[in-house]
Amino acid sequence: MTDYKELSDVELVDLLRTSDHSAFNEIVKRYSGLLINFAYRRVADLPLSEDIVCDVWADLWEKRLELVIHKGLEPFIFTAVRNRVLDHHRHQKVSQKYIDNFRDFLSEEYNKTDHLVRYNDLLTLIEREIAALPENMRKVFELNRKTDMTRKEIALSLNMPENSVKSNMQRALRMLRSQLGHFLIILIYLVFEI
């Protein structure tokens, strides 16, 4: 029986390419703490740092068969985490720009009856789509968006694994996006922030 702790990164990557789960698990054990710390120093949010690293691990597993690593595993995965952090910051800037512009628009138009009617129609549409989500997804979504609970708090509240909370949240957002469009996801954020 192979002791994976004794294997080099190169050997683990070779085994990973053959879909060896134990090799993958050893890579995750070996680098998760370092990668989460690396991400945390850049985003200052532990759950987000954990999500970023988890996404990198998921990508690594999904692309294991065609994996090409030139300078070693460690630089490869640290670069992947850095790129995810940069993507997150870019996304935050774009989202914040839309949110700021929309809040400005709302504040200018707030007293107009037409605006209030459209706003209420939009709220009704959003609430109807949220209510149409499967029960677990809806509960997770509402606890996160309406009560601002963290993934860990939601997992404890609903007595489900934290990964299930994350996947339910991602699926809920995907379903709402497909029903309402990307722009309305920003509106959902605004509706529950106002």
Image (cartoon, rainbow, N blue to C red):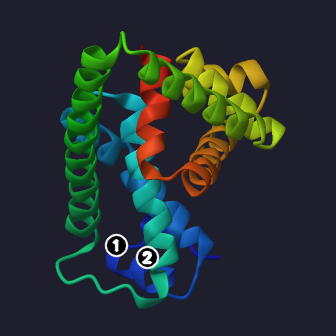
Q: Nearer the viewer, residue 138 or 38?
A: 138
Quadrant containing the N terminus in the rendered view: bottom right
Q: In the structure shown, which secondary structural element does the residue marked by tag 1 occupy?
A: helix
**Of residues 13 and 110, the one drawn nearer to the viewer in this rendering:** 110
Residue at point 64%, 36% (across, down): 125
The residue that appears at 58% across and 14% down in the rendered structure is: 147
Label 1 to label 2, Cα distance in Å? 5 Å
Asked which quadrant contains residue 39, the reply is: top left
In the rendered structure, are the residues bearing label 1 and label 2 in contact, judged by CB atoms less than 8 Å apart? yes
Q: Dot 2 corresponds to which residue?
A: 12
Give the farthest residue toward the front.
113
Residue 82 appears left or right of 59:
left
How far from the left and from the top, in percent, is residue 38? Answer: 24, 42
Q: Give the image location of residue 46, x and y in percent.
A: 38, 30
Residue 186 horizontal side relative to residue 109, left or right: right
Q: Which amino acid type corresponds to the residue marked 1 in the rendered image?
A: Asp
The x, y position of residue 171, in whole percent, is 63, 51
User: What label sits on residue 180 in the rendered view?
Assistant: none
Q: Secondary structure at mark 2?
A: helix
Q: Is residue 120 left or right of residue 182?
A: right
Residue at (63%, 48%) from the top-left corner? 167
The residue that appears at 20% across and 36% down in the rendered structure is: 97
Q: How many marks?
A: 2
Between residue 135 and residue 20, name the one nearer to us.
135
Mark 2 burial class by Cα count in 10 Å: few <14, some 14-19, many 20+: many
Image quarter where the C terminus lies is top left
Q: Which residue is mark 1?
A: 9
Q: Residues within 10 Å of mark 1 (few under 14, many from 20)?
A: some
Q: Whole-percent x and y of residue 74? A: 25, 64
Q: Is residue 156 above or below residue 68?
A: above
Q: Amino acid at mark 2?
A: Leu
